[in-house]
Image (cartoon, grey):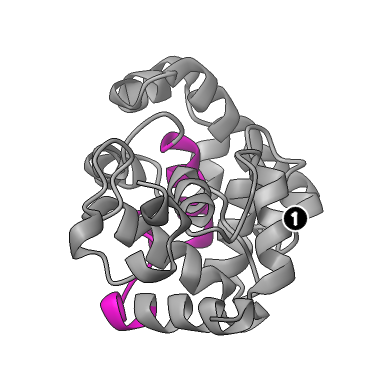
Amino acid sequence: MKKAEKIQFILDTLDGLYPQAECALHYTHPYELLIATRLSAQCTDERVNKVTPALFEKYPTLEAFASADFDELCEMVHSCGFFRGKAKSIIEMSQTILEKFNGQVPDNIEDLTSLSGIGRKTANLICGDIYGKPAIIADTHCIRLSNRLGLTTSKNPEIVERQLKAIIPPERQTKLCHNLVHHGRAVCDARKPNCGECPLKDVCVYFKHL
């Protein structure tokens, strides 16, 4: 199978398996996704989704986050881990969005990564999910599965992002990343991948070397 055929097979198979795949974090407004993603660092999406309903109720606007009491915010996000750094980032990013971006979450990588605590992974998620732009969200699932499938050759998120952007059609990039998260959780586990049940095993470099 040629490389282009392999890529098409992977994309189509994953779309068939996870037609409704999307970001697992719950949000209503763009800034809420930004905040939820910041909380998800070194924390599960499940835990974040348990914290954010009360959080977004207490702070119902970007202005409310920008003027939040640091200690109170720390208490609310404590269970997400690294709570002091996350609370500090949330307050600072909210202030910057209001002061520099007229209250609108930026729509490009450069401006998004200028916000406190925001890296390329989160910036790409915002660009892809909020603004519908081509985006590679190089999280742990994306990195692990793209390497196992032979689509990428690095564990470095920026290199993985660059390699996938070079081979994945722009209109399918964001969906692929969400599909990889779902497949990573359902089948391609980090420690014990269920290769026998995986419909991608015939094109998987990892499986071929077992």
Q: Is residue 44 left or right of residue 101?
A: left
Residue range highlighted in magenta: 15-40
Q: Is residue 60 above or below residue 168?
A: above
Q: Is residue 18 left or right of residue 119?
A: left
Residue type at the position of mark 1: Ile
Residue, x 71% and y 46% (percent of image)? 158
Does residue 182 appear in this view?
yes
Task: Report x, y in % for residue 36.
Answer: 42, 45
Q: Is residue 206 magenta?
A: no
| Quadrant in the rendering for residue 14 | bottom left
Residue, x 36% and y 80% (percent of image)? 13
Question: 102 or 4: nearer the eye?
Answer: 4
Residue, x 31% and y 37% (percent of image)? 44
The residue that mark 1 highlights is 109
Does residue 101 appear in this view?
no
Q: Is residue 16 above or below residue 101?
A: below
Q: Is residue 104 left or right of residue 203?
A: right
Task: Report x, y in % for residue 8.
Answer: 52, 83
Residue, x 36% and y 54% (percent of image)? 207
Q: Is residue 40 above or below residue 166?
A: above
